[in-house]
Image: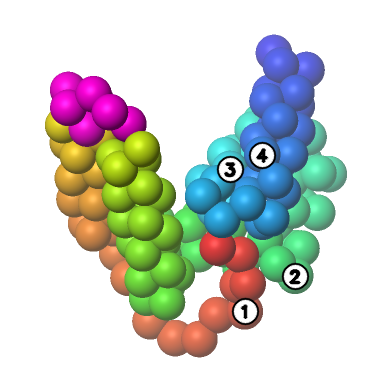
Amino acid sequence: MRILFALLGGLALLLGLIGVFLPVMPTTPFVLLAAFFFSKSSPRIHAWLVNHPWCGPLIQDWQTHKGVRAHIRRRALWMMAISFCFSMYVIPLWQVRVGLGLVFLLVVIWFLRLPVIDGPSKVVLK
């Protein structure tokens, strides 16, 4: 099971790294997912991720408070809105557009219910 979690953690971290360069690909959820998988498979890699200057504060905020910083929340909401609107624009089927709209609405409701953490953060990921 540890090997499976390590592979999934590596895949999630790779997807998060790709998300740094692609504006429509999220980074934060994949980094958090990688931290979860590495916590189950490799304490050494998990510790490296938690202490990493870019990923660490984000992971620590999530593990400690189960929330996000206000500026990260704003950025994530804008990126989600842009991505969903673009997808709805290019998809010709109205049924898929309605489905995308419902998924967007549910994700936004869930995201807005997360606690907002006060104070400055050194997180630079999107």
Question: Are the residues tagged 4 and 2 within 8 Å (C-beta)?
Answer: no
- Mark closest to the chain's N terminus, 4 or 3: 4
Q: Provide the secondary structure element on which disc 4 rests.
A: helix
Label 1, label 2: how far apart the Cα atoms are = 8 Å
Is residue 107 something that shows in the picture? no
Q: Provide the secondary structure element on which disc 2 rests.
A: loop
Instruction: Say which residue appears at 32% left-offset and 31% top-offset.
Output: 91
Circle 4 Cα neighbour tier, 10 Å, few/some/many (<14 / 14–19 / ≥20) = some
- Mark closest to the chain's N terminus, 1 or 2: 2
Stretch of the chain drawn in magenta: 91-97
Question: Are the residues tagged 1 and 2 within 8 Å (C-beta)?
Answer: yes
- Type of residue at label 4? Leu
Picture quarter with the C terminus: bottom right
Q: Which residue bears the numbered disc 4?
A: 15
Q: Which residue bears the numbered disc 3?
A: 30
Residue 91 in the figure: left or right of residue 21: left
Question: Are the residues tagged 3 and 2 within 8 Å (C-beta)?
Answer: no
How many numbered circles does the render carry?
4
Q: Nearer the viewer, mark 3 or mark 2?
A: 3
Name the disc covering residue 122, or none: 1
Q: Which residue bears the numbered disc 2?
A: 53
